[in-house]
Image (cartoon, rainbow, N blue to C red):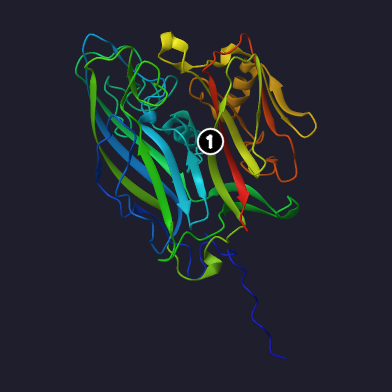
Amino acid sequence: MANQAPVVQPGSQFDIPGVPNATQWYDQYEDTQDLALTPGNTQKSVLNIQDMRRTDVVFDWEYVWSFANVVTFDVTDVNRSAYFPYNIFGPVKMLIQNQYSCIDVENGIDWYIFNLVRPYRKTAADRLTNNYANTAGSPVGTPNDGFLYAGDPQANLVAPAQFGSAAIAANTTDNVNIVLDLPAGVWFDEYYALDVSGNFLAATADTFVSPQYMAGTQRLIRPSIKTNPLIAVGSGSDESPYNEAAAGTSTVASTGSLNIRRHGVYGNNVTASLPAPQPWQYQWLTQRFAIAGVSRQIIQIPDDAGQVLFLYLRLWDPAANGGLGAPIQTSALTKVSLLYGSGLTRFEGTPLEFQALWIAKHGVLLPPGVIGYDCGLDELGTFSNKRALNTLNTAGIEWSLEFAAPTSNQAYAVLGTESLVYVV
């Protein structure tokens, strides 16, 4: 019998040097370039973003936004929101292949949180610089940090210096650059393949998980992004980047532009040199829950969340700050628990202890009023799905919050989940 050639498995030669048709990487523009946009006084869709139909394998899309916001006002003070500048964006969705929105978040601050926690490039620098901004504790642009300091360090062209939230001077112009990603899948340091029931199948290292190649002219990847009203009167600073206490003649005029970049590899029709598709879709999702007038609140993670890698709660009180609205600070909590199964504890402790664990894993603080737990990072800093809270084989995954005093009758929480969802 003639010897048969060995069967080359899909993905077996992905990103390995020295093999025929080796993986060819790129970082380049998408079809949407220099797109002009003008946010206004109502929620508006960002129009004319082109569908992603290129014939190459895409891992991630990078959205580079630039805004010039001109603020004028009467005698009423105008303030920046606690979520400024990210809540210039409203709902953000991304639809892949007419399946469902694998990205579906309600506010730009949620888009920012997911980027902060799970950057496309998993490096310490990304975390320490808090998504490019010069924040408190960041080594960017500070004296004695390893380069010659002459009183004028290299300018940060990606993001301006940290904005304050105090009353804005008359006729202020905020020049804002925002760089945020929408991922097509997720990179793992270690990946444990599971079936639809959560049973273990195999383990691999350094894996990109997506159910499809994100390639081919017949593919359809469609983002949907809205901008929020630029200014809110009274309550509403959670959903507007600026707010004022009472109606007057204050205005905000904004002009913006968008460039979209894509990261991936050239598809050469050799499946061995492309990442092997997996039956799991990466997902970012937010849902809102009322927490009105409570001293203790249980918030259930949806049963269809799949393998939960990271989850957070964003707490907001529209009645705080004299009716202008403000985050519910984590210091208002006395105990936070993450529970699963029949009352089993994944973590419980005070907000201080939650925060200490978070800083140990990520090195930066979350935005005000946000608590989070990362199931994906272990003690060695390895990112994998081996410790995910899996709703497919575990019931009753929930947050339990205990407050020092009852919340207001307008308070709410936004639940954010990063997970792998099984695709049939």
- In the image, what residue occupies the spot 24% across and 14% down? 248
Estimate the x, y position of residue 236 in percent, counting from the top left. 40, 21
Quick one: quadrant of the C terminus? bottom right
Element on which disc 1 rests = strand
Q: Is residue 412 above or below residue 37?
A: above
Is residue 3 or residue 253 the one in the foreground?
253
Q: How many marks?
A: 1
- In the image, what residue occupies the spot 62% across and 69% down? 9
Check disc 1 and report the residue beneath it. 286
Q: Is residue 342 left or right of residue 57?
A: right
Q: Is residue 167 left or right of residue 206?
A: left
Estimate the x, y position of residue 205 in percent, counting from the top left. 63, 52
Is residue 339 or residue 148 the one in the foreground?
339
- In the image, what residue occupies the spot 36% across and 25% down? 240
Q: Residue furthest right?
A: 342
- In the image, what residue occupies the spot 20% across and 14% down? 170
Q: Is residue 3 above or below residue 203?
A: below
Q: Is residue 263 left or right of residue 370?
A: left
Estimate the x, y position of residue 271 in percent, counting from the top left. 54, 68
Q: Is residue 123 above or below residue 98?
A: above
Kindly indicate the quadrant of the structure image that contains residue 51: bottom left
Kindly indicate the quadrant of the structure image that contains residue 381: top right
Estimate the x, y position of residue 367 in percent, counting from the top left. 48, 23
Of the residues shown, which amino acid type is indicated by label 1? Thr
Q: Residue furthest bottom?
A: 1
Quick one: quadrant of the N terminus? bottom right
Kindly indicate the quadrant of the structure image that contains residue 251: top left
Is residue 229 or residue 188 the one in the foreground?
229
Mark 1, other Cα within 10 Å: few <14 / some 14–19 / many ≥20: many
